[in-house]
Amino acid sequence: MHLRYVNEYRRVGLETGVSAASPHKMVEMLYDGAIRYVREAQRHMAGHDVAAKGEAISRVIAIVEQGLSGTLDRARGGTLAERLSALYDYMCRRLLMANLNNDSAALDEVATLLAELRDAWQQINPDNAAPPVSLKVVTA
């Protein structure tokens, strides 16, 4: 896995064996981290902690932009990769607006989208079938 993705996993505080995880498991861990930081942002928003809310939202955006979107192989992933890329872009825009407008509904929307994608990702059994989206796996 590319070094910047490994660093992103570490940065979001996932302490389970990233270096030994499969690419499939790493994507699952990215979804988990993003969902966790959206929930953290919601708590900070409710507690009127603007700085902590902004930091949590920034972490979600980094996970989505650098981690999840970065794993898409647009050349081989076809329409599904394009649609996921567009959905990730949409989520980042919603997160930015949530931060600017203290919009908890936008955070709920992003959390729901991430959870649905994570659930769908978990349904894929990497031992029995290739993932529906090709992943770029670059070794450091």
Image: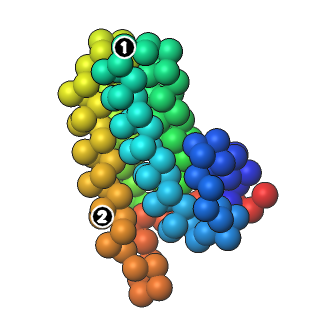
Location of residue 139 in the rendering, given as x and y in whole percent from the top left corner: 74, 62
Secondary structure category for the residue under label 2: helix
- Relative to the observer, which residue lies in front, 57 or 79? 57
Using the image, determine if residue 13 lies above or below residue 117.
above
Q: Position of residue 41 (x, y in %)?
A: 40, 29
Question: In the picture provided, is 128 more to the left or to the right than 137?
Answer: left
Residue 58 falls left or right of residue 138: left
The answer to whether residue 86 is above or below residue 75 is: above
Furthest residue toward right: 140
Quarter the N terminus occupies: bottom right
Q: Are marks 1 and 2 in contact (CB under 8 Å)?
A: no
**Quadrant (top left, top right, bottom left, bottom right) of the C terminus:** bottom right
| Residue 54 point in image, percent of width and height | 47, 20
Q: Residue at x 39, y 23 (%)?
A: 44
Name the disc covering residue 120, or none.
2
Q: Residue at x 42, y 64 (%)?
A: 133
Res. 83 in view: no
Q: Secondary structure at mark 1?
A: loop
Q: Quadrant of residue 16?
A: bottom right
Asked where in the image residue 100 lies, by quadrant, the reply is top left
The residue positioned 70% from the left and 64% from the top of the image is 19
Does 138 sit above or below residue 40? below
- Which residue type carries mark 2? Ala
**Up-down: is 18 above or below 62?**
below
User: As shown in the figure, which amino acid type bears the numbered disc 1?
Assistant: His
Name the colouring of the figure: rainbow
Per the rendering, the mark at residue 48 is 1
Looking at the image, the residue that sits furthest to the bottom is 128
Outermost residue on the left side: it is: 105
Residue 118's image quarter? Answer: bottom left
Q: Nearer the viewer, mark 1 or mark 2?
A: 1
